[in-house]
């Protein structure tokens, strides 16, 4: 199993999927971590003009499905995506691609991974915006 953590630095979970720079992909075999790989994420051009603190309604997003698809090319071999938050359109796109999505307020990837492995990392649907 491969889990893609949405991240800017490979150690913490980004609060917004669309603005993050990369994915930390963790490979698990029989519940044990066997590899980590930091992968660049194609940016969502619709977010290029936003600052890190800017938030707006989902209907204000102007990017199309091709922008979302470009962001997923680096994680086509993953089964789960863990992020600090994401737009409703990205959530739908990930699920349509067969990926399980988990939104969390946990910021440290190592802590989130251990919580996930313990079966205690639950999706926080309120982090869809």
Image: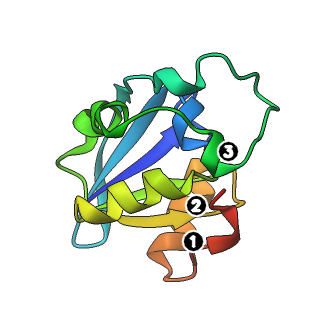
Q: Residue at x 58, y 78 (%)?
A: 122
Kind of element beneath mark 2: helix
Q: Residue at x 49, y 71 (%)?
A: 116
How far apart marks 1 and 2 lie (CA) works out to: 5 Å
Kind of element beneath mark 1: helix
Which disc, if any, is residue 93? none
Quadrant of the snapshot with the C terminus: bottom right
Q: Residue furthest right?
A: 53
* Number of dots carrying numbers: 3
Kind of element beneath mark 3: loop
Q: Residues within 10 Å of mark 1 (few under 14, many from 20)?
A: some
Foreground mark, 3 or 1, reads: 3
Q: Which residue is mark 3?
A: 15
Horizontal side of residue 122 vs 119, given as left or right: right
Q: Are marks 3 and 1 in contact (CB under 8 Å)?
A: no
Q: Are marks 1 and 2 in contact (CB under 8 Å)?
A: yes
Q: Which residue is mark 1?
A: 115
Q: Earlier in the sequence, mark 3 or mark 1?
A: 3
Q: Earlier in the sequence, mark 2 or mark 3?
A: 3
Nearer the observer, 88 or 104: 88
Q: Residue at x 75, y 42 (%)?
A: 56
Nearer the observer, 108 or 7: 7
Q: Residue at x 57, y 28 (%)?
A: 8
Which disc, if any, is residue 112? 2
């Amino acid at each position: 199993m491969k889990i893609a953590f949405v991240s800017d630095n490979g150690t913490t979970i980004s609060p917004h999927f669309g603005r993050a720079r990369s994915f930390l992909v963790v490979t698990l075999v029989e519940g044990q971590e066997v590899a980590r790989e930091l992968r660049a994420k194609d940016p969502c051009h619709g977010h290029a003009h936003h600052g890190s603190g800017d938030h707006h309604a989902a209907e204000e997003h102007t990017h199309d499905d091709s922008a979302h698809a470009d962001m997923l090319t680096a994680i086509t071999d993953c089964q789960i995506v863990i992020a600090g938050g994401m737009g409703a359109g990205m959530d739908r796109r990930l699920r349509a691609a067969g990926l399980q999505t988990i939104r969390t307020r946990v910021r440290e990837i190592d802590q989130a991974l251990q919580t996930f492995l313990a079966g205690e990392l639950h999706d926080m649907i309120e982090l869809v915006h």
